[in-house]
Image (spheres, rainbow, N blue to C red):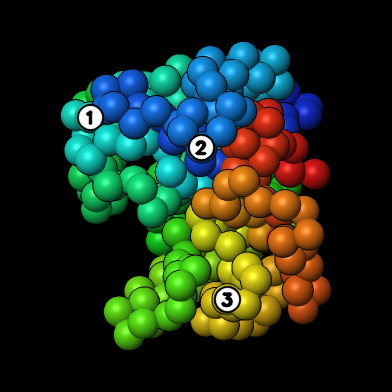
Amino acid sequence: MRILCLERKIFILYTISDPHLSFTTDKPMDIFGRRWDNHAEKLSEEWKKTVGENDTVVIPGDISWGSSFEEAYADLKFINDLPGKKIIGKGNHDYWWATMNKLTNFKTEKKLDNIEFLFNNAYAVEDKIICGTRGWVNEFGVKSEDERIIRREAQRLELSLKEGIRLKEQYPSNEMIVFLHYPPIFGEFMNLDILDILYRYEISRVYFGHLHNVREEQLDKEYIGIKMNLISCDYVEFVPQVVE
């Protein structure tokens, strides 16, 4: 599905990651610090002050702590009912995530009409083309099983970017932007498979989540000409960020 803007002159693209909702599961986030107190209410309040009904918000992962569609439904409905269209990706805690067919059927059955899934595909939104995948990082060293996941996620990113290239044939002035859940580089870890693809496809901006309670000096904000932007909820104080 391509999300196009035809009537309103200025629609805005936003992004924010890691809402970590748990309306039907016992997973309080305030154990990670006071800033997570009543975080769903904070997110709702800031979202409604910021996002318009015709805007679009990309949420690259860790949507719900639910481990099944049934457990995740209340969290997804919460996101669905907030203003704007949403494009959501998979995070490492989204255990409810499934095949695209199952995701689409569930969305249709539950009338989650304001949600689309970023999964081996791409979307044209305003003057941007949205691509992405979950990615992968292991903060404690890469093992053989991690290498397999890294290769698979790199393949998924390339599939998404190839779809983006096809959209770019229709919208040649649109900038291709990548949304990942994991950072492609953090500290000593570098996801070289992902970074290579970003470089080859001439991606200049990446937005990612996953990281919490990090300090500014820990972040690599640019690498080989690619700007890296952390947009986890707690890092941006639960305010959806404009993708300029």
Find numbered disc 3 in the image and state the secondary structure of the residue it sits on. Answer: strand
Q: Is residue 192 visible?
A: yes
From this view, report whether residue 231 is shown above or below residue 81: below
Q: Nearer the viewer, mark 1 or mark 3?
A: 3
- Residue under label 1: 71
What kind of residue is marked 2? Phe
Judging depth in this view, the residue of 202 and 169 nearest the camera is 202
* Quadrant in which the N terminus is drawn: top left
Q: Residue at x 45, y 25 (%)?
A: 79
Q: What is the number of the mark on residue 189?
A: 3
Q: Position of residue 28 (x, y in %)?
A: 39, 28
Q: Give the crowd class for mark 2: few <14, some 14-19, many >=20 residues within 10 Å.
A: few
Q: Give the crowd class for mark 3: few <14, some 14-19, many >=20 residues within 10 Å.
A: some
Return the disc, 1 or 2, that comes first in the chain's sequence.
Answer: 2
Q: Residue at x 71, y 74 (%)?
A: 202
Mark 1 and mark 3 residues within 8 Å of each other at the beta carbon = no
Q: Position of residue 201 (x, y in %)?
A: 64, 76
Q: Residue at x 57, y 82 (%)?
A: 192
What kind of residue is marked 1? Glu
Measured in 3D between alpha carbons, the distance from the residue under mark 1 to the one under mark 3, in whole angstroms, is: 33 Å
Return the disc, 2 or 3, that comes first in the chain's sequence.
Answer: 2
Q: Is residue 52 visible?
A: no
Measured in 3D between alpha carbons, the distance from the residue under mark 1 to the one under mark 2, in whole angstroms, is: 22 Å
Judging depth in this view, the residue of 31 and 22 nearest the camera is 31
Find numbered disc 2 in the image and state the secondary structure of the residue it sits on. Answer: helix
- Residue under label 2: 32
What kind of residue is marked 3? Phe
Q: Position of residue 99 (x, y in %)?
A: 24, 53
